[in-house]
Image: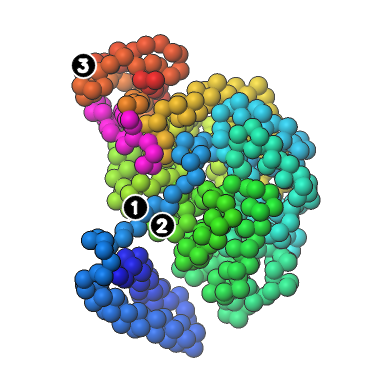
Amino acid sequence: MIDYLDFNDLQTRVVQNHFRLTIMDSKISNPLQRFQAFSSLNIFIFFSLIALTWLAACQSQPSTNNSSTQRKPEVMTEPDWAKSAVLYELNVRQFSPEGNFAGVRAQLPRLKELGVDVIWLMPIHPIGVENRKGSLGSPYSVRDYLAVNPDYGTTDDLKALVSEAHQLGLKVILDWVPNHTSWDSEWKHAHPEYFTRYNGNFTVPLNEHGEPIADWSDVCDLDYAQPATRRAMIQAMQHWIKTCDIDGFRVDMAGLVPNDFWAECRPALDSVKKVFMLSEWQDEPAHFTSAFQCNYGWKWKDITKDIAAGKQNAQSLDTLIRFLDDFYPKDYYQLYFTQNHDENSWNGSEKELYGPAADAFNVLMFTWQGMPMLYCGQEDNLNQRLDFFEKDPIKWGKFEKTTFYQNLCALRHNNRALHSGKNGGQLTKISTNTDQAVYAFTREKEGDRVIVILNLSKIPQTVQLSPKEEMTVAFVNVFNNSTIQVTQDMALQLKPWEYLVLTNK
């Protein structure tokens, strides 16, 4: 039987390459370069169309397999611990005055008490010097995939950090940068054949249209058309699983690396240890069937910022969820956040981006249908843009948001309705008399239920709810432990950005 994914992936590639021809027609002025590009792509399309015809014919023939249906793509299964996990992104350079692994280890018990489950360490490798930005450079300009940034400590220090985290019941994933290295990387010195040539020269990373990304001047693009590049990258990722027992990877710019590489990479990683894989990319549904359990909810972030600014309203979330459910495979889930290293350093602190709406959207982040993530400092109401290329430690205070996040973490852990993807309950809207301003919904899984009501506007709202009969029971208010009886003619007065989270357990 011809594999379902092979046929559809080939269709997708034909369409993508036809699109690239159109782009090249407007972008490439040199006649010889245009001829060479057109020739290679047209040859690919010609033979691909022949293959498509053959595959379609084969798929129309009766299968010799005993199964009566073709295999359909499935979302990549995750480790059991990931199903209810809360992620915590940790900027090692800025997390402590020391700016090293020892400074992280000192606060692991506090993070465990906060209620997070997974520590995501931003890149831990030595940083390139050539074309460096700032005095310390970007952690995403990797000089050596097999080494540790000496500013952070040694490989043994990292092993000790991971070991202590595991003893506390925490998992650790590494930020992985597969698309490019620094200009003075070990690989570029020893294996120049691993790298992309653009007009005959080494190049900064290329975007999804094959165009140089000008402001990424400190990094050099890797070429995944080279089998040796692929082998070396897989071996480097396996190295950290074997050496330090890490639990997975957050993959930077995963969509700029061919998806067939991820399909090749994932079994190789799982042969060492079943890992959690997070894609920092939202535009490739096939990531969910090649290697990744979760991807970035960039659209969620943009829409929630717009709602907080009054540019969109609560009903935009309905439009978003319909789009996501149509775009991705069944049982997908995304990572949701109001802050991360990019947002914080380049766009603003949570207070700048969300203002008084921040708590409401963090409640939504924990209760919608994905995996929630905190950026280091949010538990202390961080109102600081952390410098990206210099030492700029977090100015820790009294950790004033700890109780707020502890309540949300405990709710996610204890109520199965809030687990990620197919592990949790489907989001079902509860209609109100003011759906443009108020977002109300329920999720239920195996008898566990939550009801969430949020005023996503700066105006007080008088809300009339119309819950279904099965919801008309007593619930507990997550934030004050009071009991609330839900009725079919329930009325609420909500202040601007006020929220109510109810649980039946």
Q: Which residue is mark 1?
A: 329
Q: Residue furthest front?
A: 66
**Alpha-carbon span between mark 1 and mark 3:** 37 Å
Q: Quadrant of the N terminus?
A: bottom left
Query: At label 2, which amino acid type do we have?
Result: Thr
How packed mark 2 is, by other alpha carbons closer than 10 Å (few <14, some 14-19, many 20 or more), is many
**Alpha-carbon span between mark 3 and mark 2:** 44 Å
Q: Mark 2: which secondary structure?
A: helix
Tell me the residue at 26%/61% (across/down): 67
Q: Mark 3: which secondary structure?
A: loop
How packed mark 1 is, by other alpha carbons closer than 10 Å (few <14, some 14-19, many 20 or more), is some
User: Which of marks 1 and 2 precedes in the sequence?
Assistant: 2
Check the image and report above or below for 238 versus 276.
below
**Is residue 249 left or right of 41 when viewed as pictured?**
right
Tell me the residue at 60%/36% (across/down): 170
Residue 353 appears in the picture as rendered: no
Residues shaded magenta: 421-446
Q: Mark 1: which secondary structure?
A: loop
Q: Could you say which disc has been placed on residue 489 in the image? A: 3
